[in-house]
Amino acid sequence: MGEYFSGKRVLLTGHTGFKGAWLLVWLDMLGAKVCGVSLEPPTKPSLFSLLNGADMCSRHEICDIRDAARLSAIVGDFAPNIVIHMAAQALVLPSIEDPAGTISANVAGTANVLDASRRTESIERILVVTSDKVYANDGRPHAFVEGDRLGGHDPYSASKAAAEIIVDSFRAIYFHGRVPVATVRAGNVIGGGDWAPHRVIPDAVRALEAGKPLVLRRPEAVRPWQHVLDPLSGYLETVRQGIDGPLNFGPEAAGGRTVAELVEAFGRHFGGRPGWTLENADRPAEATYLALSSARAREKLGWRSRLPFEQAIEWTASWYAARTAGKDLAQFTRRQIGEFGRL
């Protein structure tokens, strides 16, 4: 991938977020010139800040993707070769609290990125990150394929499904036969440097460090857990090969584990096991089972998930342990990316 990305001008939205910061480091290691467009880091601490992410950017722009005029000016001035759109309101519970804001960010924001891109002749590839939750999920054991019906009960899931429809429209009208436009739908991602509220691993880190049991909404829910580097490798390969259309990136069947299993495994690797308790409150409706088929990614890209469940947990726990030990996190993060590339 280094041969392809070296010297490429990459517009990366959402670069201050958890997945975005990991991808920013990887692109920097590949020699890309990145213009990051995002809001301020969403958490304190944040992976982006800990790694001095701004120093890895050719341009670091704090910009709301809902500001169409400013976004268009940035895209036109930077003249990227590649657009990777990751910026989003990415959490289910905040989407329930602010549905209009979530829809605005995830649907109108995506349309703004694509609208600015269609006016920029330098662009060779576009990749839009959506979610494994774009599918109409009735909770039955079924591995979703890309052609399955889109849907979503909560505003986050619905907004991501709507974003898929928006991308499909822009692909057909503005980019068909000229620029490949991919959407990527990843499983539930874990990895070092995530401090988002209402996500299991960050909540587990806080609980373990405090020596208190973690409060879980749905411990029985099965999700396709995978280390952040697995889907990111798929995103980069999708761009490199110029794939058009949607792609799933999820773990092998054995990667589907319950929330409780994830928490207990993480505790074993992170120096303690205070356990968990069930949240004593009304809980929003969530699917009890979610799995993805990555057969198309294997066929089109030769992609495979490289870190099995226990190893993904171990890599995640070792990152947080490195922070606790005061290690150089920029160096540690780059080392994990390098080790992943050799698997």
Image (cartoon, rainbow, N blue to C red):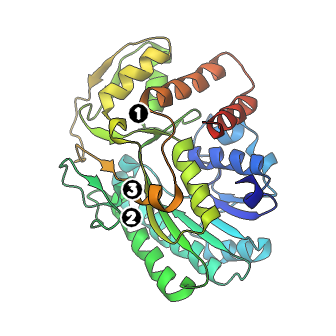
Q: Quadrant of the N terminus?
A: bottom right
Q: Which residue is mark 1?
A: 200
Q: Nearer the viewer, residue 68 or 263?
A: 263
Q: Nearer the viewer, mark 1 or mark 3?
A: 3
Identify which residue is drawn at 51% across, 39% down.
306
Q: CA distance from mark 2 to mark 3?
A: 25 Å
Q: Which of the labelled discs sits on residue 159, or is there none?
A: 2
Q: For this view, does 200 lie left or right of residue 243?
A: left
Q: Is residue 39 visible?
A: yes
Mark found first going from the N terminus, 2 or 3: 2
Rendering coords of residue 156 (x, y %)? 37, 57
Say what secondary structure mark 3 lies in.
helix
Where in the figure is residue 207, as x and y percent of width and height? 44, 21
- Which residue is drawn at the image coordinates 54% and 35% (left, top)? 191
Q: Few, some or many C-alpha atoms within 10 Å of disc 1 (few <14, some 14-19, many ≥20)?
A: many
Residue 150, by quadrant, is bottom left
Choose the circle earlier in sequence order: 2 or 1. 2
The reply, left or right, for residue 315 in relation to residue 218 is: right
Q: Position of residue 188 (x, y in %)?
A: 41, 43
Name the residue at 66% across, 72% down: 71
Whether residue 295 is situated above or below residue 274 in the rendered picture: below
Amino acid tagged 1: Val
**Outermost residue, bottom side:** 173
Q: Earlier in the sequence, mark 1 or mark 3?
A: 1
According to the picture, the residue beneath numbered tag 3 turns out to be 295
Q: How many marks?
A: 3
**Element type at mark 2:** helix
> From mark 1 to mark 3, how far is it between C-alphas?
27 Å
Q: Quadrant of the C terminus?
A: top right
Q: Callout 2, which amino acid?
A: Ser
Mark 2 against mark 3, which lies toward the viewer? 3
